[in-house]
Amino acid sequence: MAVKIIESCVNCFACEPVCPSKAIFESKPHFKVNPNKCTECEGDYPVFQCASICPIEGAILNALGEAINPPGSLTGIPPERMAEAMAELQSH
Amino acid sequence: MQLPVLNEAPAAKSGCSSSSCGTTENQMDALPDSIREKVQNHPCYSEDAHHYFARMHVAVAPACNIQCHYCNRKYDCSNESRPGVVSELLTPDQAVKKTMAVAATIPQMTVLGIAGPGDPLANPERTFETFRRLSEEAPDIKLCVSTNGLALPDAVEELSKHNIDHVTITINCVDPEIGAKIYPWIFWNNKRIKGKKAAKILIEQQQKGLEMLIAKGILVKVNSVMIPGINDQHLAEVSRVVKSKGAFLHNVMPLIAEAEHGTFFGVMGQREPTPDELQDLQDACSGDMNMMRHCRQCRADAVGLLGEDRGDEFTIDKIEEMEIDYQAAMEKRKVIHQAIQEEMDSKRLEKAHKAEQFKAEPKLATRPVLMAVATAGQGLINVHFGHAKEFLIYEASSEGVRFISHRKADQYCGGDSTCGDGESVLQQTVRALAGCEAVLCSKVGYEPWELLENAGIMPNGEHAMEPIEDAVMAVYKEMAAAGKLAAKPEALRAQG
């Protein structure tokens, strides 16, 4: 069982030092998780440390492949409002 | 960041105390000598100094421990100039090289700051490694850091070891109810915390950190982002609180919120304050506090005088190829700094003298006027209208001349979809000068001349290479003599 960092990661380094298992490492084009080391913080913390500091919605997936921080959960911007605003910008 | 920002605190609501608003004096004169000594060559802390000295930021600190509604951590655009935006993240080693390369190439560069793009104290190893090496290898550079304050109390001890005598804390509120509308979450004690509870912890840490820094004798400037309808009414209280705890300067900055930045405020349609609203708030706070008005809200990797960015000359590729003899550079820098200091000192005396003279003249019964000035430093009118990327705004009144703010002439770039269409750059520039009645520059072309006149802004190229304050006062007196400045109560908005 391990979490996964995907391509929307912005390489901000925030998760790397908070990982209790030292499973996260810098890599190109983005940070990665060593699945052999990741413990999902079990025994150390009740919540995923990496996903608790990550600022990017959807950048970290749980073992089921689901976004731990789904759209709107961190910024507070409702996903439909974001889609509307981006469509508006595109139409200019 | 901009011109003489260190306005002395006006005594009354007039926005002008007799001691601070003459043509010659500025905010620096209100500071105790010990503080003035420390900030006189710091472009971000001294409005006077920002005409002469340059600063740079090194982007070594990508991680952040909070989210602010005016920030989007995804952003990286070389055409954008605002906090939190960078083009290249640096390792501490690259940052040290870059700093020394800039110091040798731009000897007026006196200050190295770490300001992001995340929170410097949420990246303690990278931030402190950079400071530690620069204290040793480039001891003639002042070091400073800005932070959201969450990790500040734990960092004060380490900060005090590295010759850092200036810290900036961004404090947008002292009330968790308001904070909950600005900060969606913080990372604290291994948990993401949201809402009022998060804001309360952040505020407590900021205030505790402020007190600890003051106790250590470290100068503290407070930055606040003015967000209409959220904290605009509250910032005068913030100003009072931080001043009572010993912060020496308050920098109230306007919210930047464009939908294309993808920030909460941008996307949700939160409006930015108008220049008038910002000035009114700065004036309201200035009764309690030294206000900074020359902040340019620069990028976390900005290089050069405030208002300019020479970062492109110092990319990682370019600095790798530079051979720097820092000992030789330091000697050269020392001579240049001394010459600038002497020039500033003599100008300060001259200003004081002129202010005395102005006080002795019969007082004009005229209304205040805003004027825009095109300058590239040295406190002179020395830029063509068409070349100006920004204008400094001064207010002339019967009390004298005071610096108010800056306005950008080139608009923020919003990326491909919004670049290059709509109104012309010239039209945008004229619109950016709304509220001003004159614009002083070294030259004005025919086309802008006509547009400016039509917009009620008098173009003036007669004071090229003259000191700004003298020229503004001369134009003001001409306007008065021409009968354009009869005091109309409704025109006295700046007198609140």
Image (cartoon, grey):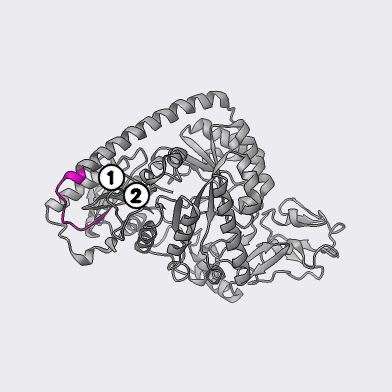
Task: Specify the quadrant of the image occupied by residue B284.
Answer: bottom left
- In the image, are marks 2 and 1 on the same chain? yes
Please check the rendered image and state whether residue B229 is part of the magenta-colored stretch, yes or no: no
| Chain label for disc 1 | B
Q: Nearer the viewer, residue B160 or B452?
A: B160
Q: Is residue B57 left or right of residue B158?
A: left
Residue B369 lies, in percent from the top left, at 24, 56
User: Which of the two discs, 2 and 1, labels the residue nearer the N terminus?
Assistant: 2
Residue B312 on image: x %, y % = 52, 42
Q: Which type of secondary structure does the marked residue at label 1 adopt?
A: loop
In the drawing, what numbered circle is on residue B392?
2
Using a 10 Å C-alpha cutoff, classify the residue at mark 2 as few (fewer than 14 neighbours), some (14 to 19) or many (20 or more).
many
Residues at circles 2 and 1 in contact by the CB criterion of under 8 Å? no
Disc 2 vs disc 1: which is toward the camera?
A: 2
Does residue B439 appear to the left or right of B406 in the view shown?
Answer: left
Residue B176 appears in which quarter of the rendering? bottom right
The residue carrying mark 1 is B441
Q: Residue at x 12, y 53 (%)?
A: B482
Residue B116 position, x and y percent, is 59, 51
Above or below B401: residue B269: below
Residue drawn 27% across and 61% down? B495
Q: Residue at x 46, y 34 (%)?
A: B108
| Amino acid identity at mark 1 | Cys
Please provide the residue range marked out in magenta.
B358-371
Chain letter, disc 2 residue: B
- Residue flagged by tag 2: what amino acid is it? Leu
